[in-house]
Image (cartoon, helix red, strand yellow):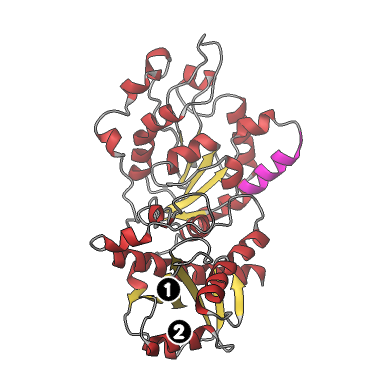
Amino acid sequence: MKGFFDVQPTKRQAKGVLSCFSCGLYKHVASPKMEAYGAFRKGILNVGEAPGEMEDKRGKQWQGKAGSRLERTYEDMGIDLFKDCLNINAVNCRPMTTDKSANRTPTSQEIACCQDRVLKVIAGHKSKLIVAFGSPAVESLLSHRWKKDLGGIGKWRGWAIPDRDFGAWLCPTYHPSYIERSQGKEEETIWTQDLKKLLKKAATPFPNWADEKQYVKIISDLSPLRDLPNIVAIDYETTGLKPHADGHRIVCASVAISPHLVYSFMFPENETDKRIFTKLLRNPQVGKVAHNIKFEEAWSVNRLGYSVKNWQWDTMLAAHILDNRPAVTGLKFQVYVNFGVPDYDSEIEPYLKARDNSGNSFNRIQVLLDKPGGKEKLLTYCGLDSLYSLKLAFKQMEAIK
C-alpha cells in the first residue's frame, strides 16, 4: 500500500541537479556506484554510511573492521550478513579526505545525490526490516520526507518504526564503526540490545494501515457530542501559542471518540452548540486525553472561563516516562515512530507559527482560513491531532500498564 508520500526522487533530482555528475565522487574511486550486495534470504536491508578503503578495493559493503564487527554480531543472533541481508550505503562511492589518504563522513549534498539510488533499491525489494546504521543512513531515508530537524542518531536509535512509505520496519541504530571507536562498553551494550530488539521485528507482520483522514468527520452541528464514550481526546487550533493577549481565540477543535472516528469543527458560535461543548469539557464522567494538556487547559481557562474536568492522560508526559531522550516526545515524532506517518502537518505548520518570538504573538491561521480549501485542511489537521493522540494514549497505557 502507498503511504502519505510516494517513495520517489525529489523534483531537484528529477531535473538532474542532484546526480552522480554533480557529486563527483565516482571519478576518484576504484569501485564507483557500488551496487547493493547480498542474497536477501530473510528480507533484511542494511543501509550503511559509505564505502571505506577495503570496501572500495573489494567492490562490496562491510569489508573493513566495522563490517567484521557487524558480521560477528549478526552471526551471534543467527543472521548471516551476506546471505540473509541485502546491503547498501547512503553514499555508494567512497568519500575521501582532500589528499585521498583517509575515509571521511559523506556530506549532506553527497547523501542527497545518492538518495535516488537508495530509494530505488528499497522500491525494488520488499524488505521486512530496514536497518539504518548511523546518521547518514537516517538522513538518506528520511530527509525527503521529514520536514523538521532530523537531529542525530541518538534521537533515532532503538525505534522500530512501521514506515508506511517503505512498507517495512525502519530500525535506526549506531554505525558499527562508532562502536569500534567507542572507549566504553555502554555503547556496545546499547547497540547489541538495539539489534536484538530490532531483528525480532523481521518476524512481526507489518501492520495493515488505513489512511486516518477517512476517520475525520467535519461537522457544523455538535449534536453528535451529546453521547460520548468514557474517554476522548481533545485538540484545539488557536490564534497563537498563549491565550492571554486581547483578540486571541480558539479557532477550531476536535474530539476523537475512538481510533476510527473523530469529530472536527469550527469553534461554536451559537448557544446550543456552545452548551454542548461546555457540557463535554465539564463532564467529570468523560475522561479527557491531550498531547501536552496544559495547552488546551490554559486556553479553556482563559478563553472559555472554566477548567476542563477529568483530564485523564497526557500523551506528551507519558512519552517522557517511556523514553526521556531529548526531542522525542513531540506529537509528530511520536506519530511517526509509532504509526509510521512521517508528515501530515508540513502544509499547515507555517500558518501556526507565531510572527515573532513573543509567547502572546498571533500566528497566520486566518491567512490559511482565507485560502480556498484552507478551512477543510485545518479541520482535517486538527482532527488528525486528536485522533493520533487517542491512538497514542491507548498504546502508551498498554505499555505502562
As shown in the figure, which amino acid type bears the numbered disc 2? Phe
Report the residue marked by disc 1. Answer: 253
Crowding around mark 1 (Cα neighbors within 10 Å: few <14, some 14 to 19, many 20+) is many
The image shows residue 376 at horizontal and vertical percentages of 30, 67
Snapshot quadrant of residue 393: bottom right
Q: Tell me whether circle 1 and circle 2 mark residues in contact (CB < 8 Å).
A: yes
Up/down of 276 relative to 316, above or below: below
- Left or right: 189 in relation to 16: right
Q: Give the residue number, with chain letter if any, for mark 2.
A: 277
Residue 226 location (% of width, % of height):
43, 90
Q: Quadrant of the C terminus?
A: bottom right
Q: Is residue 393 above or below residue 128?
A: below
Residue toward you, 172 or 67: 172
Of residues 291 and 342, the one nearer the viewer is 291
Relative height, residue 396 to residue 358 (above, below): below
The residue sitting at 57% across, 80% down in the picture is 308
- The boundaries of the magenta stretch are 184-194
Q: Main secondary structure of the magenta part?
A: helix
Q: Is residue 11 left or right of residue 50?
A: left
